[in-house]
Image (cartoon, coloured by chain):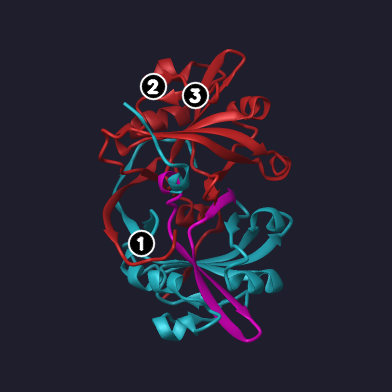
Chain colours: A red, B cyan
Amino acid sequence: MRKVFPLSKVYQLIEPGPVVLLTTAHKGRANVMTLSRHMMMEFEPPLVACLVSGANHSFTALRATKECVIAVPGAELASKIVKVGNCSGRDVDKFETIGLTPLPAEQVKAPLIAECFANLECRVVDTSIVSRYSLFVLQVLKAWTDPARKDRRMLHHHGYGRFAVDGEMFRLRSRMP
Amino acid sequence: MRKVFPLSKVYQLIEPGPVVLLTTAHKGRANVMTLSRHMMMEFEPPLVACLVSGANHSFTALRATKECVIAVPGAELASKIVKVGNCSGRDVDKFETIGLTPLPAEQVKAPLIAECFANLECRVVDTSIVSRYSLFVLQVLKAWTDPARKDRRMLHHHGYGRFAVDGEMFRLRSRMP
């Protein structure tokens, strides 16, 4: 049994990788945005494709500084994540307004986020696809996780505030990395 | 509290979009592979970036025919998905061996998969990034869902057979598509 599905909603079927936060620092000011359009391209060194449109205030910082942090929030940060997405760094200091704690990173000026269970320090290594698709290729230079944190369930955004939390986990014999 | 995380495992932190199946048809023969490295690039018309390496038997078919179907399996297909990933279309007819039912698509020669709750007929619209990153840009031409299917929980692959099933869903006020 099958039915035509609207093309405008296709992203709800296959987009939901985990929602992450992307921080930048530019002209002495840190900013943070939500990001769900990202994809691993290489395992090691880890290359990540991420789509940051020119409409985002972070776009300018990312292009100018060629540095960012991808911070992976747990499910309990859902309401803060939505706040990050609903306002712009043009207007407010999101860290202060929303209550996220920036921490110094080691290899980039963009801050880590203390509340996130993983933080990836990244450098932009390829901007040749930016003009066509707003797609930046990042190399992860350093990755941090919180070893005290056992619950690593992530959030998947299905569009307009509908989220799924990682549920049951299980293991099968697979050779796929 | 934080700890350095191995760069070789970074993909486990941010990769897990839903695992999908990708079908092709080439020289009269259909094939299917697992795909978890994909990303929405545009909402409408829907553009999807997907990474199919030259090591995959489907790579040749995809590049030659410029057509495929992305089929979205529910969590109950986990063991079949793993079988799809653990063998090659070079050696076997995966549909028959594994027990997946190919159905004719409308706009492409690659088959839909009856057992999947959504099927997206796609055309390759940009191969300029293939040589550098094995990244194909697909346009979704037609999307099908199974309206009888209410359970649309997807599978997220965390590497080497560790899967998370979509769990609890909730809604927050968000302007993000």
The answer to whether B74 is drawn above or below residue A98 in the figure is below
Left or right? Give the position of B149 relative to B29: left
Crowd band around label 1 with a 10 angstrom C-alpha radius: few (<14), some (14–19), many (20+): some
Residue B26 colored in magenta in the image: yes
Q: Quadrant of the N terminus of chain B?
A: top left
Q: Which residue is mark 1?
A: B161
Task: State the residue lying farthest toward the top.
Answer: A28
Crowd band around label 3 with a 10 angstrom C-alpha radius: few (<14), some (14–19), many (20+): few
Residue occupying image coordinates x 74% and y 56%: B128
**Mark 3 / mark 2, whichever is N-terminal:** 2
Crowd band around label 2 with a 10 angstrom C-alpha radius: few (<14), some (14–19), many (20+): some
Image position, residue B140 (x, y; %): 60, 62
The answer to whether A23 is drawn above or below residue B148 in the figure is above
Residue range highlighted in magenta? B12-41
Residue occupying image coordinates x 26% and y 40%: A151
Left or right? Give the position of B32 relative to A82: right
Residue B139 colored in magenta in the image: no
Disc ID at residue A100: 2
Residue type, label 1? Gly
Question: Mark 1 and mark 2, same subunit?
Answer: no
Residue type, label 3? Glu
Q: Which residue is mark 3?
A: A106
Left or right? Give the position of A22 relative to A173: right
* Marks 3/2: CA–CA distance: 19 Å
Image position, residue A41 (x, y; %): 57, 50
Helix, strand or loop at disc 1?
Answer: loop
Which of pointers 1 and 3 indicates the residue nearer the eye? 3
